[in-house]
Amino acid sequence: MFRVIISLFISSVCFQFVAQTTVSGGIYQNTTWSASGSPYLMTGSMVVFPGVTLTIEPGVEVRVTPDYSFNTGNLRYLEVRGTLVAVGTVSNCQFIDNDFGFAEAYGHTIQNCYFEGNGVAIDNSGGANISNNTFDSNVLAVRLGDGSSLTNNIITNNGVGVAVLAYSPNSTLIENNTICYNTDYNLQNLTDKNFQVNANCFCSQDSTYIENLILDGYDDITKGLVNYAIYDDSCANVLDYVVKINLDGGAGLATLQPNSWRLKCQDANTLYIESAQVFQLELINSIGQVQKEIMLQKGENKISTNHFPSGLYFLKNEFGSTQKVLL
């Protein structure tokens, strides 16, 4: 069950329709909100009951009437005890001036959406795929839990860009985002775990400036440390890596499982890979050409990369599992 709390306005793409449908209360049977009935004017809180599916078609706009008792805590919300389907994905949407955009994004794919002026744009306890969105002028853009991916988003001019609270942040992918100009912090590590965010651009070549906008163990000894990369002005090329800690399986990292390997960290000239057994990897460039065959030994492996051109590469094992790396 999750609850989407909406105070003012949620929409998909901005089409104009003559029709208008007023909705409120319980949804007790499978229901579809279609483009022909859009916009849907939600005049009160709603519940999708167990065993029932609410399907919201692409292009549908959902509007929420003002709740003048808001200050008493009487929020308008859509609570899903059954199933909410938006073509399996919430996409091409706008979340503007809400307390929460998504009050709980667990298990959802949220893509190509715009979030502005919200208290918390996306509050995610885990299992979400958040990609290709724009977050601007929210108090907190994304709160990120376990087993989630945050990729290819533009996260700028918020109070806090990304707050990581996953119990195991190494299960969470934070990659190819532009996380810049957020006033309090670009990134908060709210855990005691160490992790890296090398494949993200912070829009500065000044490590002191970047560091001041990352909350981690340098600021609060109860928190873990965060490694990151410094990019050029295009956010395409890595100039340097800031490695505060080698991610060597110490406190805060999950135990490496049998028949597995992981990229622990990297610096300007070396990949540090831990393996539970002997593995063969291939280093493949962005056009699919094998650049190097790597035989991993059990334990820590150091792979020199100083003779490869800068760019995007993939580590691929003999079973087809891949890991993206930027050199």
Image: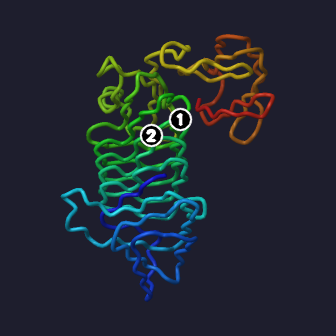
Residue at the location (54% across, 59% down)? 50
Q: Give the residue pinned by disc 2.
A: 144
Q: Amino acid at mark 1?
A: Thr
x, y percentage for residue 265?
55, 21
70 up-or-down from 250: above or below: below
Indicate left or right for 301 with 69 as reference: right
Answer few, some or many: residues within 10 Å of disc 2's Cα (few below 14, many 20 plus, some between 14 and 19): many
Answer few, some or many: residues within 10 Å of disc 1's Cα (few below 14, many 20 plus, some between 14 and 19): many
Q: Amino acid at mark 2?
A: Leu
Instruction: Specify which label sits upstream in the sequence, 2 or 1.
Output: 2
Q: Dividing the picture into quarters, in which one does residue 51 lie?
A: bottom right
169 up-or-down from 91: above or below: above
| Secondary element at image label 1 | loop
Mark 2 and 1 residues: CB-CB less than 8 Å, in contact?
Answer: yes
215 up-or-down from 201: above or below: above
Residue at the location (37% across, 30% down)? 190
Residue at the location (42% across, 34% down)? 164
For the C terminus, give its image quadrant: top right
Count of numbered badges drawn on the protein: 2
x, y percentage for residue 166?
46, 32
Near-viewer residue (71 or 39): 71
Outermost residue to the bottom: 18
Residue at the location (43% across, 17% down)? 244
Near-viewer residue (59 or 62): 62
| Secondary element at image label 2 | strand
Q: Give the residue pinned by disc 1.
A: 172
x, y percentage for residue 13?
47, 71
Outermost residue to the right: 318
Compute the Cα span from label 2 to label 1: 8 Å
Indicate left or right for 309 with 56 as reference: right
